[in-house]
Image (spheres, rainbow, N blue to C red):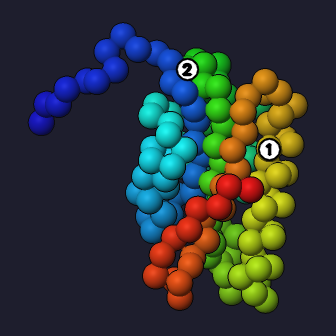
Amino acid sequence: MKTRFSYKDIHHCDAVVLTCIDFRFWRETLEFVEQELGIKTFDFPSLPGSAKAINECLGENDLAFQCIGVPCELHHAKKIVIVNHEDCGAYGGSAKFESSEEEQKFHEEELEKAKAKLVDKYPEKEYILVYARLADEKENIEFLKI
Ligand SMILES: [Zn+2]
C-alpha cells in the first residue's frame, strides 16, 4: 500500500494528546479532539491510564515523560491535552468505586496531579484536561473539560 504523506516538510504540530490505550475510547477521543477542540495536528501517544502513567513516572527519561517531551521539544506543541476515561482498567475499572461521581472526582484529581507534574517543566503550555464519562446508561461517551 502507498498513501499520500500529507505533512511533507512539516515538523510542527499544535498539540500533544495523551490518552489511554483502551480500544473502546481512542477513536471517539480523536473525533473529540478534532471536532470539539478544533485541534488539527497533534501527536497522539497512548499509555495505560493516561494521567496515571505521568503520575507514576520517576524521571524525565521515563517513557511517559518522553511521550510529552518529544511533542513539546521536537514538534513545538503548544497545547497539552490529557484524557482519562471512566471504567479504566489501568486503575482497576469502575468496580473500584462506590459511584460514578466518586470515580469522576478521582479522575479529575489524577488529571490535576499530572498537570501539576508537567507544569514544572512546561509552564508556558496550554493545558486541557478531559474526562470521558459513560452517559445515558453507557450508550454514549461524554467528554468533559475539567
Ligand atoms: Zn484506560
- Residue at which label 1 appears: 115
> Is the residue 74 above or below the residue 142 in the image?
above
Image quadrant in which the N terminus is located: top left
Q: Position of residue 145 (x, y in %)?
A: 68, 55
Q: Label 1 amino acid?
A: Lys
* Residue under the image location 61 percent in, 71 percent down: 133
* Disc 2 packing (10 Å; few <14; some 14–19; many ≥20): some
Q: Which residue is mark 2?
A: 75
Report if the beta carbon of the residue with label 2 is closer than 8 angstroms to ligand 1: no
Horizontally, residue 140 falls left or right of residue 62, namely left
Of residue 53 and residue 37, the one placed in the foreground of this image is 37
Disc 1 crowd, CA 10 A, few/some/many (<14, 14-19, 20+): many
Image quadrant assignment for residue 80: top right
**Quick check: 145 left or right of 26?**
right
| Quadrant housing the C terminus | bottom right
* Mark found first going from the N terminus, 1 or 2: 2
Residue 5 is situated, as x and y percent measured from the top left of the image, at 25, 24
Q: Secondary structure at mark 1?
A: helix
Whether residue 64 is visible here, answered yes or no, is: no
Asked which secondary structure carries label 2, the reply is: loop
Q: Where residue 90 sits in the image (x, y, percent)?
A: 65, 67
Residue 33 can be seen, yes or no: yes
The residue that appears at 43% across and 52% down in the rendered structure is: 31
Cα distance, mark 1 to mark 2? 20 Å
x 84%, y 51%: residue: 113
